[in-house]
Amino acid sequence: MDSAGHARRRRPISLVLTWVLLVPLLFFVVKGSFSFDHRGQNNAGWHGYGRLMDTGEDSAYFAVQQALIYLTLIAVMRESALRLFLKLRSYPILMALPIWAVASALWSQSPARTIVFSSFIVISSIFALYLLERYPGEELIRLLLFVGVVALLLSYALVGLMPSAGIDYTSDAGWGWQGLFSAKNQCGIVAIYLGLTPLFLSGLSRTYRAAAYAYMAAALILVIMSQSRTAWLVLASSLVFLAILELYRRFRRLERLLLWVAVVAFVAMTAWIALSYAPLLAVSLGKSATLSGRTEIWDAILPVLWKRPALGWGYRAFFIGLKGESGALALSTGFLSLGNAENAVLQVWLEVGVIGVLLMAASLLSACRNGAYCMRRNPSRYLKWCVTIVFLNALTVIDGDKFMFANTIEWLLYVIAYVSLQDQARGLRAEQTRGGIA
């Protein structure tokens, strides 16, 4: 497409709504916590001891910040919120886990906290449907590209002009860029989510294509300079996955089957190597044999899981400082500022039990099934992006990130990808059925 054709596309940046939603979207991008809000805590001493009695999310400042963000979303969606909420019933597998999170307030060790954060999950799920309607197809990717450009520019500005916020000094093992984010791991992983967006846009003029390459290079540098080994591995996995997607589209049916057999075998072998030689691999990546203490945390968590195996301790109600079981866990591990399980499966299990883990698995399997079905039928670039988002969320099972966490862009994008793939798969199956009848 030439420049004139490109100009005829509606650009999200030209819409007033885009600028209204910019701050809420940035709030989700940084996972609800901007680095400049924690400059006084950006040191190893505070990281180890300063958060003993405060989870951060319970502070008055953070509560006001969240209230303003979600009130903005509700105000923007006021005319369609109820209709979109009812529409979520069309995706029962997707919404089973959020509904279970809301229900966990009945047995939560902090019911008020569970009600608040599970409400955020429901609102952000509705917001995902709202974005799908207002920014159809590639317009949504362009919106995310715009948000990504702003996030990267602000991140580089903080690294250069306000290093007390832009650089992570909480680890004795070294420093890493965190930019606008409150942790370098978050910076690296979200930079991958946003940095890949130009790959799924069509009809870019030469000027926009050059700008897109520059943007992706800036995102790559941010991932590297974050010094997050997790982000590096996620980036490598993503690039391999994108290569497989391209091969999958070109292969015939039998070749596709052989490709998937090879992929499954590779994943199984990689998992076996990772489990068998984890300490050696960690050291080779510049980490400790305990993966910066993660293995010690996991060992300490395992006995706690069986105290409430089916139901858990309530959504976002396990890690509440030195209160209840989280206090005992923090003291037993020596990680006095422990705020999460450093593993998505363990985090979900602690909060909403093994039932929640099964619901998470069902959701991911359903998304993968719909994605694979769509990929067999010459998918659009937008659907390829959706499949990639599902892949990145599936990686949370092993990369130490979190699944269905409030105030995160990951959950928002997962809902968008899940809904888009299911709608497309339903349409394709309906066409196939009508064709068979004819």
Image (cartoon, rainbow, N blue to C red):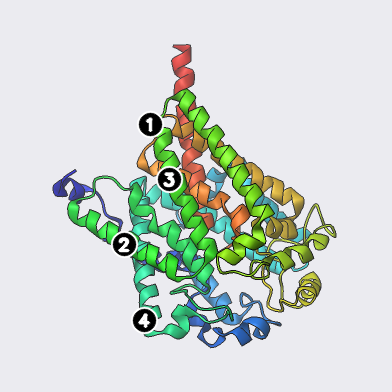
Kind of residue at badge 2? Tyr
Residue under circle 4?
160
Q: Are marks 3 and 2 in contact (CB under 8 Å)?
A: no
User: Where is residue 370 drawn, in percent x and y?
Assistant: 52, 36
> Crowding near pointer 1: few (<14 within 10 Å), some, many (20+)?
few
Q: Compare residues 165 and 335 and report the one nearer the observer.
A: 335
In the image, is residue 7 above or below residue 111? above
Task: Please give left or right for residue 296 compared with residue 365 in the image.
Answer: right
Kind of residue at badge 3? Leu
Q: Compare residues 122 and 176 and report the one nearer the observer.
A: 176
Residue 30 shows up from this direction: no
Kind of residue at badge 1? Arg
Secondary structure of the residue carrying tag 2 is helix
Q: CA distance from mark 1 to mark 4?
A: 44 Å
Residue at 24% in and 45% down: 203
User: Where is residue 67 drawn, in percent x and y?
Assistant: 54, 71
Residue under circle 1?
250
Residue that extends furthest to the top in the rendered view of this protein: 438
Q: Which numbered disc, 1 or 3, marks the residue that appears first in the sequence?
A: 3
Q: CA distance from mark 4 to mark 2?
A: 18 Å
Secondary structure of the residue carrying tag 3 is helix
Residue 357 shows up from this direction: yes
Residue under circle 3?
242
Checking the image for residue 215, the label placed there is 2
Q: CA distance from mark 1 to mark 3?
A: 13 Å
